[in-house]
Image (tube, rainbow, N blue to C red):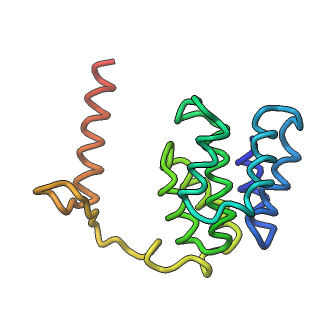
Amino acid sequence: MFFSAAIAAAFAVNQPVEALEIALTEIPAQCSLAKAVRWALQVAPEIHNYRQARNAMEEHFKGMSGVHTNNNACLTIWGLTIGGTDFTRVIGETVAMGLDNDCTAATAGSIVGAVVGKKGIPEHWYRNFNDTVHSYLIGQRKFAITDLVNRFTQMAERVASEA
């Protein structure tokens, strides 16, 4: 609910933090997530990079699972407060924080992207991929997107037929 509200609000504000503050009004004020969000926003001025973010999160949420909502929400918030309206910095800092970073970066990217619009996103994030995925797999540096889609489709059809 919180991040859905933040993404929706992001289309109508000028800064990602404004969207986060609006989203806080859409969840119960005393729930653990609201408390974590308020804490993250309160300490955000002290968080200047992914290392500080990760350290603050680890200290505050000692022993919490790496896939818990609250700790990852704080990382998402700090990615936005560190990067502001710089789409690339928001994504880079959030990914570097670790934990459930595919989700945290996608959420942070959705919020900042809604704030800045396509004009505010560097072209390399959305230009044509020419049917190519570049990888770091040894011996397989490139894949055709169409081949990956076909392989996935075949696997999905096989799993579905066996179910």
Residue at the spot x=81%, y=63% of the render?
A: 18
Residue 57 in percent (x, y) is at 62, 44
Q: Residue 121 sits in which quadrant? A: bottom right
Dividing the image into 4 quarters, which one contains the C terminus? top left
Dividing the image into 4 quarters, which one contains the N terminus? top right
Residue at the spot x=26%, y=35% of the render?
A: 155
Residue at the extreme top of the image, as rendered: 163
Q: Is 12 on the left-hand or right-hand side of 135?
A: right
Residue 108 in percent (x, y) is at 61, 58
**Foreground of the two, 21 or 53:** 53
Q: Is residue 46 above or below residue 55?
A: below
**Foreground of the two, 136 or 4:** 136
Q: Is 39 on the left-hand or right-hand side of 62?
A: right
Residue 142 in percent (x, y) is at 20, 63
**Foreground of the two, 11 or 101:** 101
Q: Residue 131 sits in which quadrant? A: bottom left
Q: Is 33 on the left-hand or right-hand side of 57?
A: right
Q: Residue 46 sits in which quadrant? A: bottom right
Q: Is 146 on the left-hand or right-hand side of 63?
A: left
Residue at the spot x=73%, y=59% of the render?
A: 44
Residue at the spot x=25%, y=48% of the render?
A: 150
Residue at the extreme left of the image, as rendered: 139
Q: Is residue 133 above or below residue 35?
A: below
Q: Is residue 106 above or below residue 87?
A: above
Residue 118 in percent (x, y) is at 60, 76
